[in-house]
Image (tube, rainbow, N blue to C red):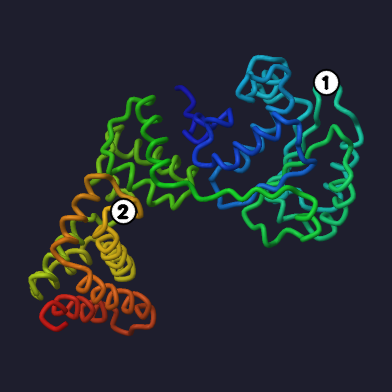
Amino acid sequence: MENFIVSARKYRPVTFDSVVGQQHITTTLKNAIRTNQLAQAFLFCGPRGVGKTTCARILAKTINCTNLTPDTEACGECESCRSFADGGSMNIFELDAASHNSVEDIRELVRQVTIPPQTGRYKVYIIDEVHMLSTAAFNAFLKTLEEPPAYAKFILATTEKHKVLPTILSRCQVFDFKRIQAEDIVSHLKSIAEKEHVNYDEEALHIIARKAEGGLRDALSTFDQLVSFTQGNLTRQLCNENLNMLDADYYFRLVDYFRAGDLSNTLLLYQEVIEKGFEGQHFITGLSEHLRNLMVSLDPATHKLMEVSEALRNRFAQQAASCGLPLLLRWLDVSSDYEYRYRDAGNKRLFIEVALMKLATAVSNP
């Protein structure tokens, strides 16, 4: 039986150009390599799963490559690149500060820094989750970080920049990684689905992207999970089932009932949602998000603010046009207020039902 490799590892970027959604970082790094203006220490910070460690590895590989391409990418064929790909590079060291955070661990690293590289140009030290280092470990690291040998480069990565000592920050070039846009995640998932011969609905990929909240690694983990669950046939319905997400159809129907002032069907639809096992908080939060999407879909210029498929954007635009901005704002005022107060409600079901009745009567009682 062939070993399964998760998509996050199998399709991990190996060049700057293949990094998803961080062009402001990769362009700066490539320019620094091209002009030979590399800092001694870098700090990569940002949310989880957005490419910090991946970019650190690509940078480490590229600056040691002996045959850079005209586009300032590692060639992938020289001895340094091959040893990196095989995991046997003697010039690139990775330390997980979450499990090696003592002053002794850093002192050992400092001792290693004094030994020049036997082959290659640079010794590169990648320290992941650097905010986990103890204060004593940080202090033991300061002098080396400020005045390292010319052949030593340090790349620190963290999800919690505010926990890194200011004295460390001042010695590094700081790169802030951003959450990856849903469109970029969807585009990347499409390319992987085609390579893996997975059938998919575009809306299903948008559901995965929304669930990931800007983290590509989370999106790829969810993608693998859903490919197994659906046996390689990703549909919107199956994705919603597996991820326990409420289908957008419920909210479209609900808004139609609000417009018609149909109290009975509004309450019956909420009963249907409860029977499917969804909690009130989940429901009211989704309703607020749906109303917000309707509001931004009133103007084509703001359609890009919705992280949904093109087909769903058109559907939002059609429903929004039949509601109008004043009504949508009244609905949003009610839903956001009840969403905020839901946690403190005693009878939570009644609380949501009162909110729904207010929304359904807002047309006749402006």
Residue on which disc 2 sits: 301
Query: In this rendering, does residue 154 appear at all?
Result: yes
Measured as percent of width and height from the top left, residue 47 is found at 56, 52
For disc 2, the neighbor class at 10 Å (few under 14, some 14 to 19, many from 20) is: few
Query: In this rendering, does residue 278 appear at all?
Result: no
Residue at horizontal 73%, vertical 44%? 42
Residue at horizontal 22%, vertical 73%? 326
Measured as percent of width and height from the top left, residue 246 is found at 26, 57
At label 1, the amino acid type is Thr
**Nearer-the-camera pick, 190 or 137:** 190
Please identify the quadrant where the N terminus is shown: top left
Q: Is residue 345 above or below residue 292?
A: below
Residue on which disc 1 sits: 119
Q: Secondary structure at mark 1?
A: loop
Measured as percent of width and height from the top left, residue 364 is found at 10, 80
Measured as percent of width and height from the top left, residue 303 is found at 30, 53
- Please state if 175 lies on the left or on the right of 332 as rendered: right
**Nearer-the-camera pick, 308 or 249:** 308
Which mark's residue is nearer the viewer, 2 or 1? 2
Quadrant assignment, res 316: bottom left
Measured Cα–Cα span from mark 2 to mark 1: 55 Å
**Nearer-the-camera pick, 314 or 279:** 314
